[in-house]
């Protein structure tokens, strides 16, 4: 193959790699846009819910006032009647009149109930939505920081693969060139030996001396080229091994990011969102159910929707909405160079000891890292459970607000002493945010550790498979190379 064709092949391979990396980079950008868009949609949804309940609170307040005016109007008419005096005295009334007074009392009770409902909407439900909106924005920002770090690590891995691939191509090209020069020297030697086979009595003494000198020069040149070829061949093998190891680690890292890390990032954005929204809507449900039990049939539909607030199913739907952004890319394939038939890590004698040492070092390092990362994982899971306990507390029951045996003042006191009392808010929010900060720190540490383990484990497993095949793999690989230059292969690596 001519030199221009070889360079063209190299450029095509590099262009193909760069195209694949470009697609991954575009996916990473698109993923961030999707997550940002989801957060914006959530914030807008929460804003709409706030506006809705604020307007509903105004309606409930107006309705409460109208009911109070209605009851007061007819109570004023009855205060001067005999029936009213009798009612105040012993409440022993005719049943139609008693129903009338009970009806007026019910109107006043409904007025208080709707005033309570308006108070719950304004000072409890709406405040919850505001907090969820703040939490969603905060979670997205923290998740974005982790995503940025993961993206940087992924691009470093891809750049490392690019570097070792180019190094492998360069050394393999030098090996091919050295082999070509060696074969040329062998041909010259054979030609010179053929000449030296002529009858000696036909050759003059001076010419015979020149031929011996020429043979020696050719032999020296052949020895130098043989040494150069052996050196370049060894470099090529080491470069190809490094390329295959890095290729395995890169594919493992990319696979882990798309299958595991990406899911964890979406979970970070969702952290507490569904549970908090569940609590807020359950507060609304509790108020409505206690206000009017006859409305249960209609409210059951809403409760069913609230019961179905599930982060896992939402995450699955979200990812299905954007298949182009979240579908894992194809694995990077080994790009052989200039007819190189070896597509696995070579463990022949020149590099076997080095590979074995490297395998043992990887095994020791992995054992230490796995123990350390397992401890970090346990801490992360325990912290996550603490956060989940914080955001799933069942504090949405407002049935006590509708106990009519109490005065209006006691009802308002009950509302103020529950979830949204200022000391309770400050303490809960401080604890939650402190726990969140610790969780994200441990999650970052765990993801970084697991990323390193994934890369090292991929190299370790590939080396284990390679070294485990023993002489069989060495024999097959040797036979593959013997087709091109058997004598040279034995000269470099032995029989």
Image: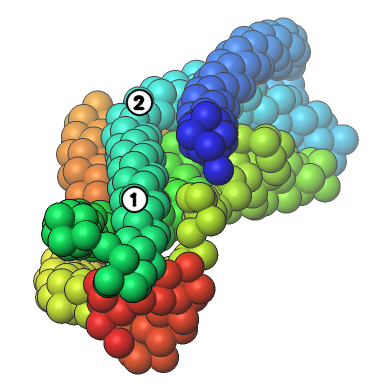
Q: Nearer the viewer, residue 84 or 233?
A: 233
- Residues at circles 2 and 1 in contact by the CB criterion of under 8 Å: no
Q: Nearer the viewer, residue 37 or 43?
A: 37
Q: Is residue 241 left or right of residue 260?
A: left
Total labels drawn? 2
Residue 190: x percent and y percent? 37, 65
- Kindly give the residue lying farthest to the right in the view shown: 96
Residue drawn 34% across the image and 42% down it: 170
Mark seen at residue 251:
none
The N terminus lies in which quarter of the figure?
top right
Residue that mark 2 sits on: 141
Residue 492: x percent and y percent? 25, 72
Q: Nearer the viewer, mark 2 or mark 1?
A: 1
Residue that mark 1 sits on: 181
Within 10 Å of disc 1 (Cα), the crowding (few <14, some 14-19, many 20+) is some
Q: Nearer the viewer, residue 242 or 219?
A: 219
Residue drawn 46% across the image and 81% down it: 479
Query: Measured along the vertical axis of the image, is residue 449 above or below residue 360?
Result: above
Q: Nearer the viewer, residue 324 or 455?
A: 455
Residue drawn 53% across the image and 56% down it: 339
- Quadrant of the rendered image containing residue 231: bottom left
| SS state under label 1 | helix
| SS state under label 2 | helix
Residue drawn 21% across the image and 55% down it: 207
Residue 374: x percent and y percent? 22, 69
N-term-proximal mark, 2 vs 1 = 2
Q: Is residue 455 left or right of residue 294?
A: left
How far apart are the two marked residues, 2 and 1, measured between alpha carbons? 60 Å
Q: State whether residue 231 appears in this view.
A: no
Q: Is residue 317 left or right of residue 171?
A: right
Within 10 Å of disc 2 (Cα), the crowding (few <14, some 14-19, many 20+) is some
């Amino acid at each position: 193959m001519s030199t221009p064709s070889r360079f063209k092949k190299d450029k095509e391979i590099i262009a193909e790699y760069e195209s694949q990396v470009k697609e991954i980079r575009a996916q990473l950008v698109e993923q961030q846009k999707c997550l940002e868009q989801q957060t914006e949609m959530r914030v807008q949804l929460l804003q709409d819910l706030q506006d809705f309940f604020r307007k509903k609170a105004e309606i409930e307040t107006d309705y409460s006032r109208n009911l109070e005016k209605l009851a007061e109007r007819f109570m004023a008419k009855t205060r001067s009647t005999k029936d009213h005096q009798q009612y105040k005295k012993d409440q022993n009334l005719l049943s139609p009149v008693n129903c009338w007074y009970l009806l007026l009392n019910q109107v006043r009770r409904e007025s208080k109930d709707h005033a309570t409902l308006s108070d719950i909407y304004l000072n409890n439900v709406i405040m919850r939505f505001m907090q969820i909106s703040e939490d969603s924005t905060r979670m997205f920002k923290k998740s974005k920081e982790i995503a940025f770090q993961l993206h940087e690590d992924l691009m470093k891995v891809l750049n490392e693969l690019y570097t070792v691939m180019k190094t492998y191509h360069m050394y393999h090209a030098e090996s091919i060139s050295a082999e070509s020069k060696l074969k040329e020297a062998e041909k010259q030697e054979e030609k010179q030996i053929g000449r030296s086979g002529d009858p000696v009595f036909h050759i003059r003494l001076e010419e015979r001396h020149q031929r011996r000198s020429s043979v020696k020069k050719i032999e020296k040149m052949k020895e130098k080229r043989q040494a150069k070829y052996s050196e370049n061949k060894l470099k090529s093998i080491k470069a190809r091994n490094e390329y295959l190891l890095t290729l395995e680690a890169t594919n493992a890292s990319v696979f882990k990011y798309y299958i595991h890390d990406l899911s964890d990032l979406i979970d970070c954005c969702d952290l507490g969102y569904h549970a908090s929204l569940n609590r807020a809507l359950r507060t609304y449900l509790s108020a409505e159910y206690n206000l009017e039990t006859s409305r249960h049939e209609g409210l059951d539909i809403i409760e069913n929707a609230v019961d179905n607030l599930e982060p896992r199913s939402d995450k699955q739907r979200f990812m299905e909405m954007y298949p182009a952004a979240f579908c894992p890319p194809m694995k990077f394939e080994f790009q052989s160079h200039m007819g190189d038939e070896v597509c696995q890590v070579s463990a022949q004698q020149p590099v076997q000891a080095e590979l074995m040492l490297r395998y043992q070092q990887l095994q020791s390092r992995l054992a230490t890292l796995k123990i350390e990362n397992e401890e970090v994982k346990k801490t992360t899971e325990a912290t996550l459970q603490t956060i989940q306990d914080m955001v799933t507390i069942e504090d949405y029951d407002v049935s006590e607000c509708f106990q009519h045996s109490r005065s209006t003042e006691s009802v308002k006191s009950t509302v103020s002493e529950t979830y949204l009392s200022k000391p309770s808010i400050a303490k809960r929010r401080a604890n939650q945010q402190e726990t969140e900060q610790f969780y994200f720190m441990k999650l970052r540490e765990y993801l970084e550790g697991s990323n390193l383990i994934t890369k090292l484990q991929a190299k370790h497993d590939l080396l284990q498979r390679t070294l485990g095949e023993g002489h069989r793999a060495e024999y097959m690989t040797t036979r593959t190379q013997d087709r091109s230059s058997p004598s040279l292969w034995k000269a470099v690596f032995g029989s």
